[in-house]
Image: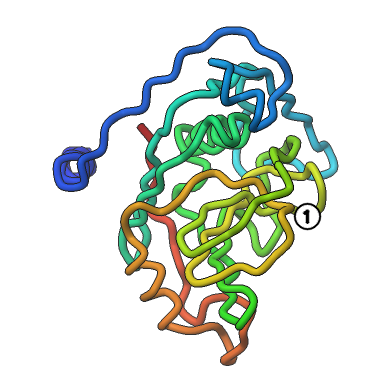
């Protein structure tokens, strides 16, 4: 535990992080436009009995802060990745993401999918069992404007169709020429070199889409 706290202190001191502070008060159903002028929104996290939770976790509270930019830190076997999240753009998604991190959902898991093609370059994580298998036992709606783009460093929710968000997310390591159908959580502020090392290690069988040639493991994650 002391070593863990020491790592956090070093990250804070070195990278200049500061805890995000978000006010909270009742508000209408979430959307990026509404969230920008509200301090909180109400989210609906819908149970999926046909897809039970891969690890014990309850849905977040329905009341989500709609202001603030919390930080998420993921420690992997390739290095650390630090993300700045945007509550105003996706309050329900960020609320869920930080909830899962605080409940250790991502700890000791793998990132099962890596793509590296002329159209799509992402690392996909958050599925506990395998690619698109092993979510949190609930789903929630997209938060989209239709104008989303996904440049290098973007962190976004993965899904299996409209309004099927859960625990899956992806990080764009190069490019993602895809439709605006994936809720944007935020962006990487430190650790793109970690993503570059993962990409350099390759994909199984030399493919453009598949499991990383050398497993990518998330040791732990934290948020503040």
- Frontmost residue, 62 versus 22: 22
Which residue is at a point 54% across and 83% down the rendered structure image?
203
The residue under label 1 is 160
Is residue 150 shown above or below 51?
below
On screen, residue 17 versus residue 23, left or right, reads: left
Which residue is at a point 40% across and 33% down the rendered structure image?
70
On screen, residue 44 versus residue 71, left or right, reads: right
Residue 149 image-quadrant placement: bottom right
On screen, residue 203 versus residue 182, left or right, reads: left
**Which class describes the residues within 10 Å of circle 1: few (<14), some (14-19), or many (20+)?**
few
Is residue 66 shown above or below 47?
above
Question: Which x, y percent locates residue 137?
Answer: 72, 38
- Frontmost residue, 62 versus 137: 62
Q: Quadrant of the N terminus?
A: top left
Q: Residue furthest top?
A: 25
Question: Which x, y percent locates residue 117?
Answer: 60, 82
- Frontmost residue, 182 versus 62: 182
Q: Residue furthest right?
A: 50
Instruction: Classify mark 1: helix, strand or loop.
Output: loop
Question: Which x, y percent locates residue 194?
Answer: 35, 67
Residue 188 image-quadrant placement: bottom left
Question: Which x, y percent locates residue 50?
Answer: 85, 43
Which residue is at a point 80% across and 37% down the rendered structure image?
48
Is residue 100 shown above or below 174?
above
Q: Quadrant of the C terminus?
A: top left
Which residue is at a point 55% across and 35% down the rendered structure image?
94
On screen, residue 31 versus residue 189, left or right, reads: right
Is residue 11 shown above or below 151?
above
Residue 140 image-quadrant placement: top right
């Amino acid at each position: 535990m002391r070593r863990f706290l020491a790592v956090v202190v070093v990250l804070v001191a070195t990278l200049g992080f500061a805890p995000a502070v978000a006010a909270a008060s009742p508000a209408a159903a979430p959307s990026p436009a509404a969230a920008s002028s509200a301090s909180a929104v109400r989210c609906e996290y819908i149970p999926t009995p046909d897809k039970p939770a891969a690890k014990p976790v309850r849905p977040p509270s329905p009341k989500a802060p709609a202001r603030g930019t919390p930080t998420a830190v993921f420690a992997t076997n390739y290095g650390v990745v630090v993300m700045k999240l945007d509550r105003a753009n996706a309050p329900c998604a960020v609320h869920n993401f930080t909830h899962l991190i605080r409940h250790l959902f991502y700890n000791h898991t793998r990132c099962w999918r890596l793509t590296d093609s002329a159209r799509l370059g992402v690392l996909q994580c958050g599925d506990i069992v395998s690619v698109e298998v092993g979510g949190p036992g609930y789903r929630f709606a997209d938060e989209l404007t239709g104008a989303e783009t996904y440049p290098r460093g973007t962190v976004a929710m993965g899904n299996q169709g409209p309004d099927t968000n859960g625990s899956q997310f992806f990080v764009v390591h190069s490019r993602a020429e895809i439709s605006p159908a994936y809720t944007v959580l935020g962006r990487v502020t430190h650790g793109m070199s970690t993503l570059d090392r993962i990409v350099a290690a390759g994909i199984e069988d030399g493919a453009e889409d598949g499991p990383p040639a050398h497993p990518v493991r998330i040791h732990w994650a934290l948020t503040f």
